[in-house]
Structures are given as structure tokens and as C-alpha cells.
Image (cartoon, grey):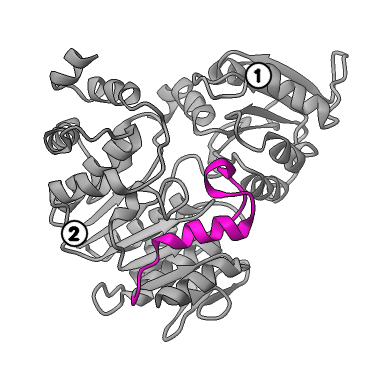
Amino acid sequence: MQAQANSTPSTLNEWLALLEQRHFKQIDMGLDRVMQVKQKLDIQFGCPVIMVAGTNGKGSTCSMLESILSRAGYRVGLYIKPHFLHFNERARIDGDMASDVQLIAAFNAVEAQRGDISLTYFEFTTLAIMKLLADSKLDVAILEVGLGGRLDAVNVIDADVAVVTSIDIDHTEYLGTTREAIGFEKAGIFRAGKTAVCGDPVPPKSLIEHAEKIGADLWLMGRDFNYQGDKQQWAYGGRNMRRNSLAYPSLRGANQLLNASAALAALEALRDVLPVGAQEVRTGLATVELPGRFQVLPGQPLVILDVAHNPHAAATLAQNLDNMGFHPYTYAIFGSMLDKDIDGVIAQLKGKIDHWCVTDLPLPRAATAQQLKDALLEAGVEPEFKPDAACTIETFETPAAAFANAQSRAGENDRIVVFGSFLTVAGVMQARRPELH
């Protein structure tokens, strides 16, 4: 191991393989080690920084901000995670994924400065991508928080605008078991004297109190900004500006106007340094893309990809499925990490799914397909053992195998929904790769 650590990897895949097994645990909360290396690297952003945290909706909000600001002609840097097919998806500059060469150079920079400080995979790669973005002469940087906020590696940067999209129960072993506890962790990205946007319509008191205690300028949904709309268009209203006749975001789903409103509040707060016109907002929202967030793929049967992996996201997925109209049968490819609230996810979706194809995932901390099947049976999902069964539960070793089975059984008017862990969706994306690329 020591010999390997002393020889610098020459490819991105070699780097990632090394980082995955170098630190003694995958998640190691705290900012001291990351802050030390950040200071050695002299990471400084010479542009406004927007930071986005939240239980759900982070990726959508980041992508909307990137799309709008890019349409306005700004050079935008984006850090978003996790990735589906390529690590490079996590870093975008001016709309393009970072190259292997750029990422390897950033990894080498972190390695040269970390000395004997041990960093997790997430901490090391976060520092590398922030170094890459900070050195790329950006007009604006958008940074997605990973887990929580207060102790997340991204939080070594002071954001000019910090956005919290939603607060719900997830990652309880690290963040706490109540919305109040989790709200406090998310509010840790707020800074004194800087704008703090909360897009959750019912924010925990802990978030409001922390913002007030540190002197952040808190913007609350329903108090400082809001939205209204009909079937054709919608409007945003903020503290000092309105945006009317807006196109609905191209990202589908019930909560996207909440996310879009939070993004527009952040842009309103930055309007003096990053002015954005009405047409750029309309076009940016209408053309934004983000894989795996209620992503409906063309063709028959319909295929829906959604990384819903907690009860809050599963409830939104259920609502979105209801809004799609009639389909004779719905097939689900479902895989999950064992530490997720699997029972809570199933409770939201069990009445929406006819045929369950549950799958193993290639990580030790994943739930097995058999564990998922047991959870479904415990929840009262009853398979019917007959040829035209209205409900089945089958287990598979991979998402690709589960998807192939669903495809072989589904009629052209049925639909297949792939949800749960990012690895579930990524596995199906990989299987469909000739069609997707």
C-alpha cells in the first residue's frame, strides 16, 4: 500500500481506484483536515459562489442556475454529484465536462499539498474539483453540497449565496433523526451578512434561528419570494422583482417550481453583479437538462429514470407517476443502500407498482435483492402466482438484468420506472448506453 501511495497514478481510473481504498472510512465528518489542505492549495474563487444544499432538489437547482447563467453569457463552473457513467460529470466548465487531463492535474495538485493528511475519496475529489474551478477564470461558480452542509467538505468555501432546497429525513446516522436537527446541519452553509435562500415551504425553526443568530440575510419561500402559475406558464415574485410569463422547467416533476423559485431568488440576490435578462431565464429553464430526475426516455414502453432514494423523493415520484395518465402495468427496477429508509420508500410507492424487479447493487453497503423482497412482503405487497399476475416480485443480481426482464414482459403501453440508488439508475443507463449515446 505504501509503495502504491508513493507512485502517482497516471490515469483518472487509477486515481479513483486508489482514492476509494486509501482512507480508513468512507465518510469522516469534520472540516479540519479539508481546511488545512484547502489553505495549502490556496483555493480562492475570484467570482461569486452559489452553494446549494438540501435533502432533495439540489441537482435540479444547480442545473437550472447553470443553464440560466450560461444563456446569459457567463462562464459558469459547476460541481455536481454523484456521477452516473463518468466521474468527469461532476465538474463542468462552460457547459463542458472536465477532461481526464484537467482532473489528473487537479488530483496531482492535492496530492502534492496534503502531506500526511488523510482524506476520504469525497474530500480529496472535492478539493481537486474546487481547485480546478477556482483556477478556471470563471464568472460564477455553483457548488453542490454532498451530505448535510455544516460538516460537508464543500463548506470550507464561503458562499456569496447559500441555497437550501428542501429538508427531510435522510442520512440520519450523520445528520440526526428529526427535521429540526437536519435543518441545523443544512443551515451550516449560511454566512454572516450573505444571502441565505430556503426553498422549503415549511422550514424548520432551527434553520431560521441559525440564520438569524449569525446575521445571514434569510430569504424564505412564501415570505420573501413565491411563485404562481397556470397550465401554460408561471411567474416568480421576489423582494424587488417579478419575472412573468415563464416557461415551465424542462425538468419534469411536481417540485420543480419550488427549485426554480429558489434558483431565481439566488439570482435576484446577485442581480447587481450577475444581471440576467428575462429571455435568458425563460430559455435557461426551458432547456435545462439533468439525467435521472424523473427523466422520461422516448419510446415504448415508456422508461422513467429517477434517483428517488428516500421517502420524501419517493412521495414526489409517486405524485409524478399519478400525473402521467393511464398505463396498464407499471414495472419497477428498484435497488437501494441498506442504510436508507427502505420501508418508507416502499410505503410511498407500493400502490403505484404492479411488478417489482428488485436488484443487488455492486457495493457492500447496498441492500440485497432478497432484503428488498422481504421488505416488500412485510409491507403487504402480495405477489400473485398465475400467468397474468397483477403483482410479481422478482430478484436480480444487477440492474441491467432486472431491466432486461422488465423489458421482456412489458407491453408497449406499459411503463418501466427505474428508481432508488444512483447505482440502480446508472446500471440501467449503462445497459441502455447504445441508445443513450
- The residue singled out by tag 1 in the image is 369
Q: Is residue 124 above or below residue 152?
A: above
Magenta residue check for 44? no
**Quadrant (top left/top right/bottom left/bottom right) for the C terminus:** top left
Q: Is residue 186 magenta?
A: yes
Residue shown at the point (63%, 27%) measured from the top left: 333
Q: Which residues are magenta?
A: 166-193
Can residue 379 be seen at all in this image of the molecule?
A: yes
Kindly indicate whether the residue at mark 1 contacts the one at mark 2 (C-beta within 8 angstroms). no
Q: Disc 1 marks which amino acid? A: Ala
Which residue does the image show at 29% across and 54% down from the upper left? 156
Q: Would you say 177 lies left or right of 26 here?
A: right
Question: Quick check: 105 above or below 242?
Answer: above
In which quadrant of the rendered view does residue 274 lie?
A: bottom left
Direction from residue 9 to residue 158 in the image, left or right: right
Front residue of this view, candidates 420 and 110? 110
Amino acid type at image mark 2: Phe
- Which mark, by number, is residue 183? none
Residue marked by disc 2? 45
